[in-house]
Image (cartoon, helix red, strand yellow):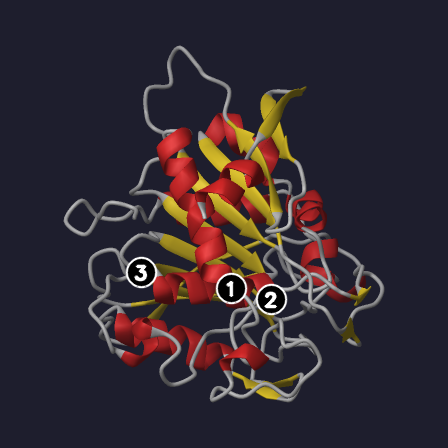
Amino acid sequence: MMTWLVALLAVVAVQHAAVHAYTSERYEAGSANIYIPEPSDNQTAQPALVLELSGRCQSGRDVERALNFRRLVDTKNFVLIVPEARRNTAFCPTCGPPFFGGPSCQAWAASPACCANDGVVPTLENRASFEPRDDVTYLHDMIKHAVSNYNADARKIYVFGYSAGGFMAHRLACEKSTEIAAIFSLTGGGIVEPGLCAAWNNTTAGSPVAVAHAHPMRDAVFPADGGTFDGAPTPSANETVSGWAEFNGCEGGVQVINGLDLFRSGGLFARGQDQDTSRVAFNNCGDGGNVEFWTIPSGTHVGVVTQNRPALAESILEFFYANPKPNSLAMLVN
């Protein structure tokens, strides 16, 4: 395991504006771009860690080009890891413009619905039909490496995912709830299959994970009301956030919190008001278990990454930094 991990994260330093960009080579097991904050005389805190996960048919570089977290690495003090999803062996019929897919598209193996089933109808009974590789371990090894080699704060491990990457963010939080402080899923989906996610099924002891789930209401790929993808059901956005709220011990309903203006005007985002994103937060959640549901009424699946403003990445980081793992719950990353 460690042999390929060392190769995976073997890096060459390249000066890039105000951050150091470390670019890995591609190896059989995968690769990642890693951005390290520039040391500062007045910066004494350990950096946080942000893992950024791309959608199906999309490279890590594609999603980072759209979100541009790297411009904030220095000012917000975090290590940014942008991994490349490994490739399916079968043709991906759902890949096309504006994504880059087709044969052997990149995908995460998160759940039966998404998204590494390699052209067969996925079933929970046949785990290989939707999980031909162990992406939880693949990504967790990156997290461990960053904590031990880049001095990342183990209380501030955050995961962002777009589309299929959102499914994978939920899966990581399910499997590594004692280590992940918070996740942000943008038009992804939760993991509700029996026996697949300890957090959803209460099969093992876990830790609350702060969750923000943002969903465009005109999403035709993973509809907010749920649907199917590649022959498997996808949960609704309400199922996703309600499941986390139950696991985290939230009580007392929800409250509306300040809306946000995160997308460029024009096209589907044309509007007569200042805010394009509404937010609600669940009340009385357990320590470290805040849950928020962001809805984007005019948003589409692709539009949320092709029409976003810099405020989107900034707001995601604001949610992350407001939700470190409480000292009482923090555990060693292992």
Q: Secondary structure at mark 3?
A: loop
Q: Residue at x 50, y 80 (%)?
A: 127
**Amino acid under label 2?**
Ala
Q: Residue at x 72, y 69 (%)?
A: 89
Q: Secondary structure at mark 1?
A: helix
Question: Alpha carbon of mark 3 to alpha carbon of mark 1: how far?
Answer: 13 Å
Dots 3, 1 in contact, CB < 8 A: no
* Residue 156 or residue 285, whichever sits in front: 156
Question: How crowded is the residue under tag 3: few (<14 C-alpha within 10 Å), some, or many (20+)?
Answer: many
Question: How crowded is the residue under tag 1: few (<14 C-alpha within 10 Å), some, or many (20+)?
Answer: many
Q: From the viewer's perspective, is 73 left or right of 300?
A: left
Dots 2, 1 in contact, CB < 8 A: yes
Question: Alpha carbon of mark 3 to alpha carbon of mark 2: how far?
Answer: 19 Å
What percent of the width, then of the height, locates residue 276? 61, 61
**Amino acid under label 1?**
Met
**Amino acid under label 3?**
Ser
Dots 3, 2 in contact, CB < 8 A: no
| Circle nearer the N terminus (3, 1) | 1
Q: Which residue is mark 1?
A: 168
Q: Secondary structure at mark 2?
A: helix
Which numbered marker is on residue 177? 3
Vertical relation: 125 (above or below) 112: below
What percent of the width, then of the height, locates residue 206? 23, 65
What percent of the width, then of the height, locates residue 253? 29, 76
Q: Which residue is mark 2?
A: 164
Q: From the viewer's perspective, is 59 left or right of 289?
A: right
What percent of the width, then of the height, locates residue 179? 30, 52
> Which quadrant of the structure image shows residue 19?
top right
